[in-house]
């Protein structure tokens, strides 16, 4: 499995070849998300204190039916661009062009988010249990004990974050497999993601940690013109290496002929 330096270098090569297309793709993605943000703001202005009850369902539905298929289309464009496919930026609308593809993407998003939510629940379960216990026993604890329990809660929160990253990393390649392997059913995509990530999740986590500086730079918003293409290219390049690495190991395993030994006892 190539290192993250090779991933970033290859990503920059792709960016140099496709700068106009990647910038256009970035503007389309940003427009998609800004429409959702403005819609949420409109709910806040129109409904006031009751906006939260309408905003949350709207946000979930917007992600499922608009944002997710859009992002999948962008991933598909960058993935295929790495093979010099010659596709234009209109490929970001790939999952809106067919009802079958569109609803398959919606079903995949539902299954994917349910699994991520389950990992989040399991990772923070110890912290939440301690919080509930602390709340129930608050009347019987002195100030020093409350501080001690607060420290334990904070520590469990940090451990929960680490555990969530580790647990959810098994699904990190699923979106790329979904857009790159049309012949696979959603359940097969999830299964393959878990198989491949066993060998490559650590490298992906290191890659994400190495991108923290770029993520912070993205908070300036205007820098998204560079950082979004960089993130997309780096993610697709890493996934390409991960798939090749998995296939290479599977090929070696299939070609290895182990002799059969029989005990003489």
Image (tube, grey):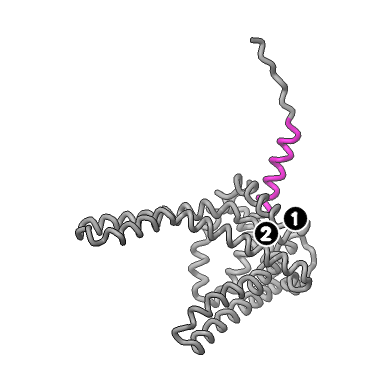
> Relative to residue 10, is residue 249 depicted above or below?
above
Q: Earlier in the sequence, mark 2 or mark 1?
A: 2
Q: Position of residue 38 (x, y in %)?
A: 56, 83
Near-viewer residue (145 or 220): 145
**Which of the two marks, 2 or 1, is nearer to us in this view?**
1
User: What stretch of residues is rendered in magenta?
Assistant: 240-256
Instruction: Using the image, tell me which numbered label, if any, was put on residue 176.
Output: 2
Near-viewer residue (31 or 98): 98
In the rendered view, does 75 fall on the left or right side of 205? Answer: right
> Relative to residue 20, is residue 169 depicted above or below?
above
Mark 1: few/some/many CA within 10 Å (<14, 14-19, 20+) = some
Instruction: Using the image, tell me which numbered label, if any, was put on residue 184.
Output: 1
Asked which secondary structure carries label 1, the reply is: loop
Q: Position of residue 52 (x, y in %)?
A: 48, 79
Magenta residue check for 242: yes
Near-viewer residue (152 or 198): 152
């Amino acid at each position: 499995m190539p290192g993250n330096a090779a991933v970033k270098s290859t990503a920059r090569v792709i960016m140099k070849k496709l700068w106009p297309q990647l910038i256009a793709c970035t503007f389309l993605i940003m427009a998609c998300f800004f429409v959702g943000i403005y819609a949420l703001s409109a709910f806040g202005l129109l409904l006031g204190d009751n906006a939260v009850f309408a905003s949350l369902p709207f946000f979930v539905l917007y992600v499922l039916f608009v944002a997710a298929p859009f992002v999948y289309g962008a991933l598909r464009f960058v993935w295929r661009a790495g093979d010099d496919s010659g596709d234009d930026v209109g490929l970001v609308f790939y999952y809106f062009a067919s009802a079958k593809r569109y609803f398959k993407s919606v079903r995949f998003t539902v299954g994917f988010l349910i699994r991520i939510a389950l990992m989040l629940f399991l990772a923070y379960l110890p912290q939440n249990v301690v919080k509930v216990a602390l709340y129930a026993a608050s009347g019987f604890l002195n100030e020093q004990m409350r501080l001690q329990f607060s420290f334990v809660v904070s520590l469990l929160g940090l451990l929960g974050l680490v555990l969530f990253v580790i647990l959810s990393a098994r699904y990190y390649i699923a979106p790329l497999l979904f857009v790159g392997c049309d012949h696979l059913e959603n359940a097969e995509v999830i299964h393959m993601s878990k198989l491949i990530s066993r060998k490559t999740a650590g490298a992906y986590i290191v890659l994400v940690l190495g991108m923290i500086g770029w993520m912070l730079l993205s908070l300036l918003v205007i820098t998204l013109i560079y950082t979004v293409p960089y993130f997309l290219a780096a993610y697709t390049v890493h996934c390409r290496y991960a798939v090749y690495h998995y296939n290479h190991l599977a090929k070696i395993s299939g070609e290895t002929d182990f002799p059969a030994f029989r005990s003489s006892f």
